[in-house]
Amino acid sequence: MEPATMKTLAAAIAIGLGALGPGLGIGFIGAKATEAAGRNPEATGKIQT
């Protein structure tokens, strides 16, 4: 492969892996908020703010 192709491919992989962590983190936050609202529906207002 040519160096320019390798550079582009490496950048795409780095961006993809860099977006993976925050995406998982935000997903876990949403999952736990939904779980907490299911356990205690009265606290839903506090959880969503």
Image (cartoon, grey):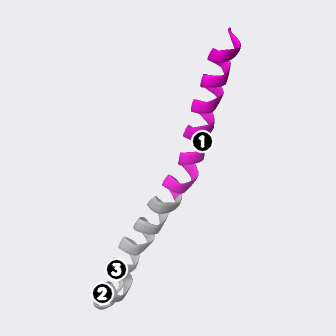
Q: CA distance from mark 2 to mark 1?
A: 34 Å
Nearest to the observer: residue 44 or residue 4: 4
* 44 on left or right of 22: left
Which three-letter amino acid code belongs to the residue tagged 1? Leu
The numbered dot on residue 17 is 1
Element marked by disc 2: helix
Q: Where is 33 relative to 12, above or below?
A: below
* 36 on left or right of 10: left
Q: Residue furthest top?
A: 1
Q: CA distance from mark 3 to mark 2?
A: 5 Å
Dot 1 crowding, Cα within 10 Å, few <14, some 14–19, many 20+: few
15 in the magenta segment: yes
* 48 on left or right of 25: left
Which three-letter amino acid code belongs to the residue tagged 2? Gly
The magenta-colored residue range is 1-24
Element marked by disc 1: helix
Q: Where is 24 relative to 47, above or below?
A: above
- Name which quarter of the figure residue 13 lies in: top right
Q: Where is 24 relative to 16, above or below?
A: below
**Residue at which label 2 appears:** 45
Which three-letter amino acid code belongs to the residue tagged 3? Gln
Where's residue 41, x and y in %? 29, 85
The numbered dot on residue 48 is 3
